[in-house]
Amino acid sequence: MEPGLAWGDGFWQRKYMSEKVIIIGSGPAGYTAALYTARADLNPLLFAGLQPGGQLMITTDVENYPGFPEGIMGPEMMELFKKQAERFGARIEHREVTQVDLSQRPFKVWVGEEIYEAESLIVSTGASAKWIGLEGEQIFGGYGVSACATCDGFFFRNKEVIIVGGGDTAMEEANYLTRHCSRVYIVHRRDEFRASKIMQDRVMNNPKIEIIWNTVIDEILGDMEPVKKVKGVRLHNIVTGEKWEKEISGVFVAIGHKPNSDLFTGVLDMDEVGYLKTVPGSTKTNIDGVFAAGDVADSVYRQAVSAAGTGCMAAIDAERFLEHIGH
Ligand code: NAP
């Protein structure tokens, strides 16, 4: 749409005509919301952000998304989601939303110096796994390093893996991994877990799990050729100073997730960690016309299929909202 100019932040900025719906974020939730709103003739505009496709772009085979009996690579699946939304006219821009103003409708959305306006907004900015900050996490992400046991545990059948973390996620994922792996080591930086007692008990009572206390991973070791894969880790006991190498096939990082909700701090209701709160059974946030879908509003399931499901719900909620306000 043709931009006009508006005064803002001390200089003239491009201002666009009001959209019916703007979607922020491009994982399964955002693309599904785009597909549904496009098919409802709402001509959605989706800002995909700087890492289009979300967390699935850092996974390899996705084998638990219904409809793909042979599995599919995460990036390929996101490309299909995108194409399907575009087929019905969704406009997808690989740009990052930097600021929003939800104080009144139309809502304002800043993309750099440009301001877009929208009668409704779907927030599907996802969550990001926290990483330790090791170079090997980047090099071997999807090739032996993972932040999702339910996504990738299956690939380590009868292999030994390490999981890092001492919270409920690490406990839950360690237990899950023992279904596939021959042995699971939990590496924790302290000598006690922060996980709930019941989760700790499950871990302590699982004969396939061994705990390595007071220890951190200094380096992830692996091969680049002929197949890129993890083959070990360099560990460091931070109490005794002892350092040693351990052969291992996989490294799971479970030190928490961070919902990508910083844009909405102080505006949308969120829990203490930053997950957006929605009215149970819907995707409605505390602001009429603003809907939240996918991992940014889900600390529990965090699956591609559940994100797509709530993306669909958000689109239908937005459509009904627009109908209600006469659009
Ligand atoms: P969390 O409770 O914040 O635990 C993160 C763990 O990672 C902590 O043990 C922390 O160590 C460790 N850690 C953080 N940064 C690290 C680093 N750079 N290097 C090494 N270790 C690091 O996160 P979470 O386990 O994902 O849980 C998040 C929330 O979801 C919690 O409220 C949890 O109760 C909830 N949850 C509940 C369930 C359930 O009930 N079924 C399942 C999963 C999650 P320190 O302990 O030393 O800080």
Image (cartoon, rainbow, N blue to C red):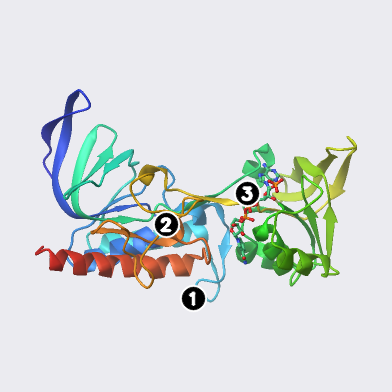
Return the disc, 2 or 1, that comes first in the chain's sequence.
Answer: 2
What residue appears at the point 42 percent right and 48 percent down from the top-left corner? 261
Q: CA distance from mark 3 to mark 1?
A: 24 Å
**Pointer 2 local density, CA inside 10 Å: few below 14, some 14–19, many at least 20:** many
Q: Are marks 3 and 1 in contact (CB under 8 Å)?
A: no
- Please indicate whether residue 240 sits to the left or right of residue 151 in the image: right
Q: Quadrant of residue 178?
A: bottom right
Residue 84 can be seen, yes or no: no
Q: Are marks 3 and 2 in contact (CB under 8 Å)?
A: no
- Mark 1 C-beta to ligand 1 under 8 Å: no
Position of residue 53 measured from the top left corner of the image (x, y, whole percent)? 43, 53
- Please indicate whether residue 221 sits to the left or right of residue 270 in the image: right
Q: CA distance from mark 2 to mark 1?
A: 16 Å
- Please indicate whether residue 42 sits to the left or right of residue 259 in the image: left
What residue appears at the point 55 percent right and 70 percent down from the top-left corner? 71
What residue appears at the point 89 percent right and 41 percent down from the top-left corner? 244
Q: CA distance from mark 3 to mark 2?
A: 18 Å
Q: Nearer the viewer, residue 223 or 90?
A: 90
Residue at which label 1 appears: 66
Residue at which label 3 appears: 141
**Pointer 1 local density, CA inside 10 Å: few below 14, some 14–19, many at least 20:** few
Residue 271 can be seen, yes or no: yes
User: What is the three-letter code of the residue carrying label 1?
Assistant: Pro
